[in-house]
Amino acid sequence: MLRVIRLTKSYRTAGEEIAVLRGVDLAVATGESVALTGESGSGKSTLLHLIAGLDAADSGEIRLADVSLSGLNDAGRAELRRYRIGLVFQQFNLIPSLTVADNLVFQSRIAGRHDAAWHDELVGRLGLEPLLTRYPEQLSGGQQQRVAIGRALAPKPSLLLADEPTGNLDEDTADEVLGLARDLVDRTGCGFLMVTHSARLAATLDRQVTLHAGVVA
């Protein structure tokens, strides 16, 4: 599903060039869940953003199934995100002016892939029926994260990327939300790559990959 080959990325800060990724190799199979771990500054979030097409690498290649991100411009990467990649961030990034119901269908409608039956299943599995008319500010952190996961999975992406998706949640809620995410990933068969600092949560996924000083340790 995903292959990352010799990926490098540097940033220039105050006249100094900082190498964040120094030749990363990574693969995620269809239906596989992988935890991406490592100390702060090891390049985890940078790698996730590059895979999502939110930034461009300096060198190397990212392949999502039969598509190489390296040959895509900004518009091409945005189209890939729209149709084939689901994103879940620690900050949730829900649209405050939309209800839960409208947030849930936002991504799938933009992609032209709204499936009413799948939408109803997500609502049921995520326990969102009582919340559909509420706005994000009226939800708890765990409830907002459930909506964010549902929105990301609504278009049935090929790959789900999550950056510390449970970082703002208490342990019980984190376990519940991650369990639901894994169930839904299993249900759709998409790949799942999650950045996490939690060794406990990482151990619940199929495999762990550790970044250290910009390379896979």
Image: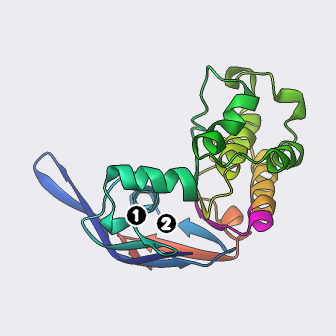
Image side of residue 113 versus residue 212, left or right? right
| Magenta region | 185-196
Q: Tell me the element at label 1.
A: loop
Gap in Å between the C-alphas at discs 2 and 1? 6 Å
Q: Between residue 17 and residue 148, name the one nearer to us.
A: 148
Residue 106 drawn in magenta = no
Whether tag 2 and tag 1 are in contact, CB under 8 A, the answer is: yes
Residue 28 coordinates in the image, percent (x, y): 57, 76
Q: Quadrant of the N terminus?
A: bottom right
Secondary element under disc 2, as helix, strand or loop, is loop
Name the one closer to the observer, 67 or 135. Answer: 67
Q: Which residue is mark 2?
A: 38
Report which residue position mark 1 lands on. 42
The label on residue 155 is: none
The residue carrying pointer 2 sits among few (fewer than 14), some (14 to 19) or many (20 or more) residues within 10 Å by Cα, namely many
Seen in the picture, residue 24 relative to 44 is either above or below; the reply is below
